[in-house]
Amino acid sequence: MGTAPSPISLDELRALQLSRLRAGLADVLRDNAFWRARLSDVQGWDDFERLPLTTKGELIADQTAHQPFGTNLTYPIERYVRVHQTSGSSGDRPLRWLDTAESWARWLSIWSDHVYRAAGVGSRDRIFFAFSFGPFIGFWSAFGGAERLGALALSGAGMTTEQRVRSLLDLEATVLLSTPTYALRMADVGRGLGVDLALSPLRVTIHAGEPGASIPATRAAIESAYGASCFDHTGMTEVGPTGHSCSQRDGIHVIESEFIFEVLDSSDRPADEGELVATNLGRWGMPLIRYRTGDRVAVSREPCSCGSSYLKLAGGIHGRVDDMFTVRGVNLFPSQVEDIVRRHPQVVEFAIERRRERQMDEVTVLVEIDGSDTSAERLEADLRLALGARLVCRVVPLGTLPRSELKSKRVISA
């Protein structure tokens, strides 16, 4: 496994963060119209904590009013070299996000120096990207990070799932990058082709876009299918690559040398569990300050045996704040359902159908099952025992639920 960054004390880390924030804000406060109207100078942490929180809705409104890129631009447009956009999986209008050469280089260094390092990936590896490389940021930075690392970067763009499975084998890839759901989809297709991917040269898989790689049952299913060690990675188009799992794989270390992270409860007060708020410390051409990520997390500063002193998101990202549903007084997240459902190898795919009846959440878990050892009744019993709530399960025909190489939408409205 990879090695952790050199330990740094919390006081040293806070001093580093504040220094980088103040240095970067100098240009922003002078030249960025979006932030000049919202921010004031930051001399210390008290000043920082008085800055307003930023929402995705505000960014979308700004880009809608000032097309195509909005007013969150610190430099003349000629200085920017890349534009990507969010996936739009939440139903919002996709956000376009620009990078200068300097900020893009920082993205790539986070991948090579942090994410790949934590997973033990090096220059001798062959890294296969099961991704189409469209305008969505996806694994674009991971691909560039692999090149920076000196590894052989293998694009799966423009391929069907069957072609990707065969290319993975033909090119003798040692590392796979994909969403967790798509990794399981590839393994399923491989079995249909008579291919056992667990016998391939793959030794590491890295996943993003969904919480799955931090969910024990999903991680175990991927590791069983590929005979490889499975790692999680977190990031956002508008923020950057924020964290990764370590050798313990019991959570996500967020990269505090590159970001300021806060966790706020429903009243916007600091808490150990709540919504993750992020401030980027190196993307000054199009920065984000105190940005509500919408991700629900629980954090720990307990020492990690991997040696990293960075904050850990225990169990990874639990889900989107607005994806929480309540069944008979029990608050649940899709990741909790996934951890139970994925313990049944014969479950090929699943989704959570949610509807509101008489001011209450009514939930049905839709499952595709290949085989006879698992039934809706058995799943319902396991979910009730583990979660303390009764969730109705309904088996649907194989191939009914949507598939995508991008983020899977686990909660659907009936």
Image (cartoon, rainbow, N blue to C red):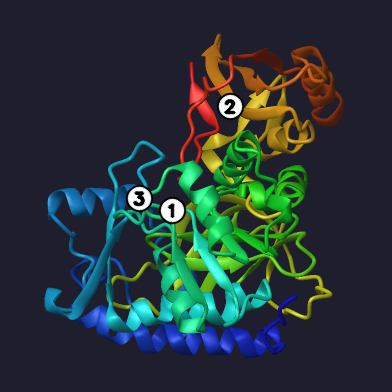
Label 1 crowd bin: few (<14), some (14–19), many (20+), radius 10 Å:
many
- Mark 2 residue type: Ala
Identify the residue shown where x is 70% and y is 32%.
337
Q: Position of residue 182 (x, y in %)?
A: 55, 44
Q: Which mark is residue 351?
A: 2
As rendered, which of 154 and 410 lies closer to the eye?
A: 154
Q: Earlier in the sequence, mark 1 or mark 3?
A: 1
In this orientation, does residue 258 appear? no
Q: Position of residue 105 (x, y in %)?
A: 38, 82
Q: Secondary structure beneath disc 2?
A: strand
Q: Residues within 10 Å of mark 3 (few under 14, many from 20)?
A: few
Residue at numbered disc 3: 158
Q: Callout 1, which amino acid?
A: Phe
Q: In the picture, residue 147 is in which quadrant?
A: bottom left
Kind of element beneath mark 3: loop
Q: Earlier in the sequence, mark 2 or mark 1?
A: 1
| Relative image position of residue 114 (x, y in whole percent) | 59, 78
Q: Residue at x 84, y 75 (%)?
A: 305
Tell me which residue sits at (50%, 75%) in the image: 152
Real-space Cα separation, disc 1 to disc 3, in angstroms: 8 Å
Q: In this orientation, which residue lies closer to the viewer: 126 or 50?
A: 126
**Three-letter code for the amino acid on which mark 3 is drawn:** Gly
Q: Is residue 346 left or right of residue 288?
A: right
Residue at far top of view: 358
Which one is closest to the eye, mark 1 or mark 3? 3
| Residue 19 position (above or below residue 353) | below
